[in-house]
Image (cartoon, rainbow, N blue to C red):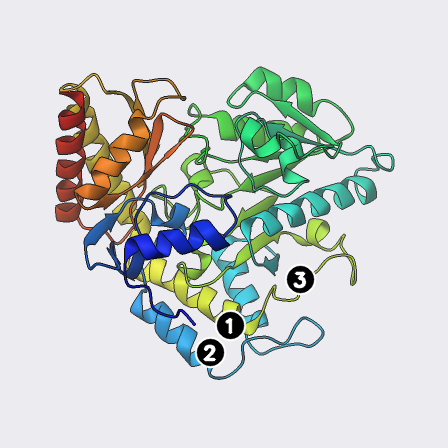
């Protein structure tokens, strides 16, 4: 039996032979993580500039979170929701008070949380807004990414997520992101129960809407009695310089969807928050999850969120995000390879002057890795750059030096 990987190539060969080919990873095999760093099986150290798609905002293997994991794992890990446990209610109270909602529903994956939000919105539409049975509509935005379940991709405009997986579920209308007029027109439909948005579209390439777009969306939802469903799975938990990206505009979602960094990257934990008139439309037996709300996840979630507050990670992200963007904008003046820099806090992207079909961004990420920094392209010519929020200013400048060196080398 193989239980030890001796080389990167051996690990890659095993995955190629025995694993499904549903990912295309960079050829780096990681073995250890600590803070902003990861090490491969040969011992080479890298700066992590993806943060597991913002799941490790608190840094890899944060000692407080790991200690809580060990402590709780020795006591009780899973009961199912057939019984109460002594950790879930404490966690529910903690997150409700932290984010300002009356009820919390814990799930596991981000996609599961979005599926939960869809069911809540539809049930609310039928029982509270009196939408005729099976006619509820959820309005989504172009270029969205909420997961890859068959329901969720029914609201997607991404060809790679949809092609070959139909037929798709009805009940979604897709409008242009960051378009106020499209919002006004779509939400006027009396059968619309919810508007489903990311405050910044991370997977699409860190698309930041214009100032005021989210506030307009909130106001139009109130005007037309539509629920605002905010997917903050990637943008939440201090990533953009505030606890929630929607906080930048003072927007409060009716249904808040969280995941990823809720556990600091230790295990799958996701969360849906809403007030009583929305959350209580779902009755016992109508929705659930064997692992959702398990005591291990509940204990870890509290500790992971407490770390964010205690270490002032939102403030760190706000300050160092500006440092990072300033460095990238200065780099743009030295090269034609980068045409755009965008982002908020420590969720940023650079757009490479090439078509989405080009391999330039991929090759640049390979060059980053050779120089000790890990990032990955999205949509061909966009590189998302999102380090753990525990990164220091000195480390940010060191990473910017690596990026600059690689970009100028490729440009030459």
Q: Quadrant of residue 139?
A: top right
Q: Quadrant of residue 379?
A: top left
* Left or right: residue 379 compared with residue 139: left
Q: Quadrant of the N terminus?
A: bottom left
Q: Quadrant of the C terminus?
A: top left
* Left or right: residue 317 compared with residue 235: left
- First in sequence, mark 3 or 2: give its number: 2
- First in sequence, mark 2 or 1: give its number: 2
The extreme right residue here reads 133
* Secondary structure at numbered mark 2: helix
Q: Quadrant of residue 310?
A: bottom left
* Secondary structure at numbered mark 1: helix
Q: Position of residue 345 (x, y in %)?
A: 31, 39
Q: Nearer the viewer, residue 373 or 80?
A: 373
For marks 2 and 1, give the CA distance.
6 Å
- How dense is the environment of label 2, judged by Cα within 10 Å: few (below 14), some, or many (20 and up)? some
Residue 289's tag is 3
Residue ID for mark 1:
296
Residue ID for mark 2:
72
- How dense is the environment of label 1, judged by Cα within 10 Å: few (below 14), some, or many (20 and up)? many
CB atoms of marks 3 and 2 within 8 Å = no
CB atoms of marks 2 and 1 within 8 Å = yes
Residue shown at the point (55%, 19%) measured from the top left: 180
* Secondary structure at numbered mark 3: loop
- First in sequence, mark 1 or 3: give its number: 3
Residue 220 visible in the snapshot: yes
**Compared with residue 302, is residue 77 higher up or lower down, i.e. above or below?**
below
Q: Position of residue 257 (x, y in %)?
A: 56, 47
């Amino acid at each position: 039996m193989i239980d030890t990987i001796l080389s990167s190539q051996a690990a890659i060969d095993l995955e190629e032979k025995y694993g499904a080919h549903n990912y295309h990873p960079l050829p780096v095999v990681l073995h250890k993580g600590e803070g902003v760093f990861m090490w491969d099986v040969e011992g080479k150290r890298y700066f992590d500039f993806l943060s597991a798609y913002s799941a490790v905002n608190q840094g890899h293997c944060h000692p407080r979170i790991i200690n809580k994991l060990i402590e709780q794992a020795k006591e009780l890990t899973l009961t199912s929701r057939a019984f109460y446990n002594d950790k879930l209610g404490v966690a529910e109270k903690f997150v409700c008070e932290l984010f300002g909602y009356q009820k919390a529903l814990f799930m596991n994956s981000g996609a599961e949380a979005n599926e939960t939000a869809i069911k809540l919105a539809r049930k609310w539409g039928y029982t509270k807004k009196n939408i005729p049975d099976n006619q509820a509509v959820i309005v989504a935005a172009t270029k969205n990414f909420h997961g890859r379940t068959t329901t969720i991709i029914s609201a997607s405009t991404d060809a790679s997520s949809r092609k070959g997986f139909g037929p798709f579920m009805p009940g979604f209308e897709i409008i242009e992101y960051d378009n106020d007029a499209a919002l006004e027109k779509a939400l006027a439909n009396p059968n619309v129960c919810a508007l489903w948005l990311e405050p910044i579209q991370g997977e699409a390439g860190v698309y930041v809407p214009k100032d005021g777009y989210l506030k307009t969306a909130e106001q139009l939802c109130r005007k037309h009695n539509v629920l605002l469903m905010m997917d903050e799975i990637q943008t939440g938990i201090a990533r953009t310089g505030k606890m929630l990206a929607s906080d930048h505009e003072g927007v409060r979602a009716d249904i808040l969807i969280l995941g990823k960094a809720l556990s600091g990257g230790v295990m799958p934990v996701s969360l849906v928050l809403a007030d009583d008139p929305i959350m209580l439309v779902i009755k016992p037996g109508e929705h659930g999850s064997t692992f959702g709300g398990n005591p291990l996840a509940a204990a870890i979630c509290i500790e992971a969120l407490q770390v964010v507050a205690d270490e002032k990670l939102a403030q760190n992200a706000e300050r160092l995000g500006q440092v990072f963007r300033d460095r990238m904008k200065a780099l743009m003046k030295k090269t034609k390879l980068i045409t755009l820099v965008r982002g908020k806090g420590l969720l940023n992207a650079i757009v490479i002057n090439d078509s989405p079909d080009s391999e330039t961004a991929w090759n640049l990420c390979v060059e980053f890795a050779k120089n000790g920094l890990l990032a990955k392209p999205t949509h061909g010519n966009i590189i998302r750059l999102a380090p753990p929020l525990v990164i220091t200013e000195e480390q940010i400048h060191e990473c910017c030096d690596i990026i600059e060196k690689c970009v100028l080398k490729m440009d030459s």
